[in-house]
Image (cartoon, helix red, strand yellow):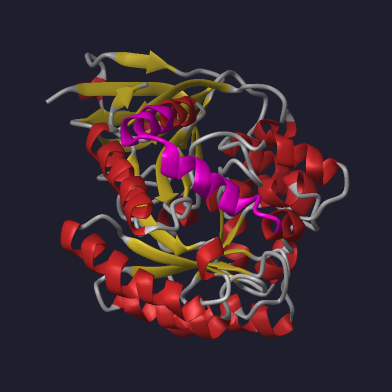
Amino acid sequence: MSSQLIVNATLVNVRDTSPVLRGMELAELPCIKDGWLLIEDRHVAGIGTMEEMPAGLNGLPRIDAAGKFVLPAWCDSHTHLVYAGSRETEFVDKLRGLSYAEINARGGGILNSARILRETPEEVLFTQAWSRLDELSRLGTGAIEIKSGYGLTVDAELKMLRVIRRLKERSRLSIKATFLGAHSYPPEYRDNHQGYIDLITDEMLPVIAREGLADYIDVFCEQGFFSPLETEAICRAGMAVGLKPKIHANQLNLSGGVQTGVKLGAVSVDHLEMMDEDAITALKGSATIGTLLPTAAFFLRMAFQPARQLIDAGCAIALASDLNPGSSPSGNMNLVVSMSCIQMRMLPEEAINAATLNGAHAMELGAVTGSLTPGKRADLIITRPMPSLAYLPYAFGTNLIERVMIDGEFV
């Protein structure tokens, strides 16, 4: 059994228990200013102040983290990491005035990514996704959810999910897979919505269930995409084969996606750029986590999610990157945390909790990672020397990560 000791560090998000954090609880970030952390057999085995460190630990290999901060690795609970090709031409189209919906309506957006992905061999998809995953791990991400949804045919959706399974098998990161066949209607089903829903429920889901390819089912509940009734039908079909729902909700309009997700007991409802009192009331009274994706709002030049209103109402919120080629071509969770503070007025403590512990809960990994808790995986970020924890989101253009440990090993 290998052991390693980190000493003289400021330890961040130190907890004996790790429940979902709601409302004002998000501002509570327990820290040890001059602490030690023991890692044994890839897990956090002990933690405390230097003043009270057991003498028996003195002979262990150690890392001196004086002036540095040790945080749990980021938990990114909403990504589309498996995709083929970039979409910078659409980026220019947006600069020229076209909206996200207009680009999608003329065959761009999700449909553009789907065409490219169908033509890309599985091995190429895997190689590209593995490279992205490696980059994100070096930026501090230790747990990640990855969606399908750029296939929109039986073969292409299954191809994406099999790539995600290969990533799970090879990577040390904690990875959750989400089936998002209901991301958009393919052109051939544009006037036959029920036909595509039948394809999802009758042909995709049975194979996904048989091969164990997904943990969750997701639907893009939005005007021009899937209605609340269609969303509910698709989610219930997924739930019938053991997939829990996570819903794209209220990104472009007050779509009813939040209320639908709460009704279904969704693990999370994600985006939430457009929220009213009814949606906030539904969310705060539920066990569902609201996942905010500020870099998507930033990239699309939309209003940012009302984080302060959601926190003040007592909601449980998480932060995630929404990494994808069309609306958030970055998986850098350090930027997500900074942007959440700068543009959504979240306190550094709130943003860090939302990007670690609550992000873990949004993937049902709260007992595994997301805080510095004895028994959890050793998924850690060691920063460069910093004057304070607030410096991490404040210095948004600086890489402040010195080392990243995933599952007890440095990347």
The answer to whether 154 appears left or right of 13 in the picture is left
Looking at the picture, does residue 229 appear above or below residue 140?
below
Looking at the picture, does residue 34 appear above or below residue 100?
above
Inspect the magenta stretch and tell me whether residue 14 lies in it: no
The answer to whether 341 appears left or right of 372 in the picture is right
Q: Which of the 4 image quarters holds residue 410? A: top left
Find residue 258 and report its horizontal and vertical position in percent: 58, 76
Q: Residue at x 21, y 30 (%)?
A: 40
Q: Residue at x 25, y 61 (%)?
A: 208
Find residue 245 and report its horizontal and vertical position in percent: 41, 70
Tell me which segment is drawn in magenta. Answer: 106-130
Work out which quarter of the rendered image holds the N terminus and state it: top left
Choose between 255 and 355: the one closer to the eye. 255
Looking at the picture, does residue 274 appear above or below residue 110?
below
Q: Can residue 360 be seen in this snapshot?
A: yes
Work out which quarter of the rendered image holds the C terminus and state it: top left
Q: Which of the 4 image quarters holds residue 272? A: bottom right
Choose between 243 and 382: the one closer to the eye. 243
Q: Can residue 284 be seen in this snapshot?
A: no
Find residue 117 and report its horizontal and vertical position in percent: 46, 42
Q: Which of the 4 image quarters holds residue 25? A: bottom right
Q: Residue at x 88, y 43 (%)?
A: 96
Residue farthest to the front, as pictured: 188
Looking at the picture, does residue 7 appear above or below residue 273?
above
Find residue 185 and report its horizontal and vertical position in percent: 53, 66
Magenta stretch: dominant secondary structure:
helix
The answer to whether 395 appears left or right of 5 in the picture is right
Q: Residue at x 64, y 50 (%)?
A: 109
